Amino acid sequence: MSGADTAQDAPILILLGPPGAGKGTQARMLEEKFGLVQLSTGDLLREAVAAGTDAGKAAKAVMEAGGLVSDEIVIAILSDRLDDKDCAGGVILDGFPRTTVQADALTDLLHERGQSVNAAISMEVQDDAMVERISGRFTCAACGEGFHDTFKPTEIKGVCDTCGSSDLKRRADDNAETVAERLKAYHLQTAPLITYYDSLDALKRIDAMGAIEEVASQLNSVVTEVTA
Ligand SMILES: [Zn+2]
């Protein structure tokens, strides 16, 4: 927990990580360790609609008409949310900003509040290794046990170690080609944000290829450093 006494001191962190890099797990660990609140765009929208705030009503109208909620509305919802008491210890933004236009809008919003992004943390991965990691996964449909072709194979091929079932399933979108495309799309989308936060001197890169604890340890160091 940092020494955040006022909202102005509350750290604002952005977590950037490709699918499969363990971003969700790491964000939850940071929440617990530093008293941060993870704010994902989807949750923000749902909560604001449910709470019936002005921005929530605007978002609801757009979504019901099948449209995309504008950056302006998302920023208004985020602004409301940052005023909530539970955010006084700082937040981790997940899924926002997605574009440099949104990043600029966020910079302006925070500036008005006397705040700024303390760190945009990029969880860096090696794409080839990620493809192997994700495309090797399979699960026992009977008991839910997870396995991996390379890292955790079954003792007997095609048979679950835990329950003996041979009903082992792979997620359709875990195949190597799809994973490689998801990573490519991630890099294309994220590269401008990396440049943007690097130019603000707020970019932190961590190696996200290690074990969960190793990645967590690097994240802890970064968060401790930027919230000190
Ligand atoms: Zn099983």
Image: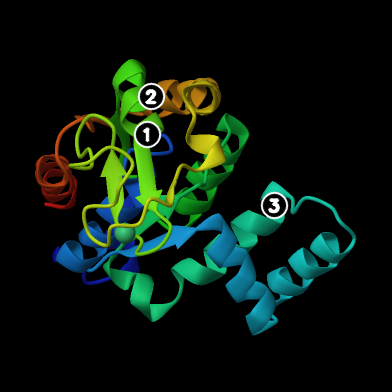
Lower position in the chain sequence, tag 3 or tag 1:
3
Mark in front: 3 vs 1:
1
Q: Residue furthest top?
A: 128
Q: Quadrant of the N terminus?
A: bottom left
The residue singled out by tag 2 in the image is 131
The residue singled out by tag 1 in the image is 134
Q: Is residue 226 above or below residue 174?
A: below
Whether label 2 touches label 1, CB < 8 Å: yes
User: Which amino acid, mark 3?
Assistant: Glu
The residue singled out by tag 3 in the image is 72
Residue shown at 62% from the left, 70% from the top? 46
Whether label 3 touches label 1, CB < 8 Å: no
Query: Camera-side residue: 63 or 125?
Result: 125
Instruction: Count neighbours of disc 2 (C-alpha within 10 A) and say few if under 14, some if 14 to 19, many if 20 or more.
Output: many
Q: Position of residue 74 (x, y in %)?
A: 64, 56
Residue shown at 36% from the left, 70% from the top? 87
In the image, ligand 1 is in what quadrant?
bottom left
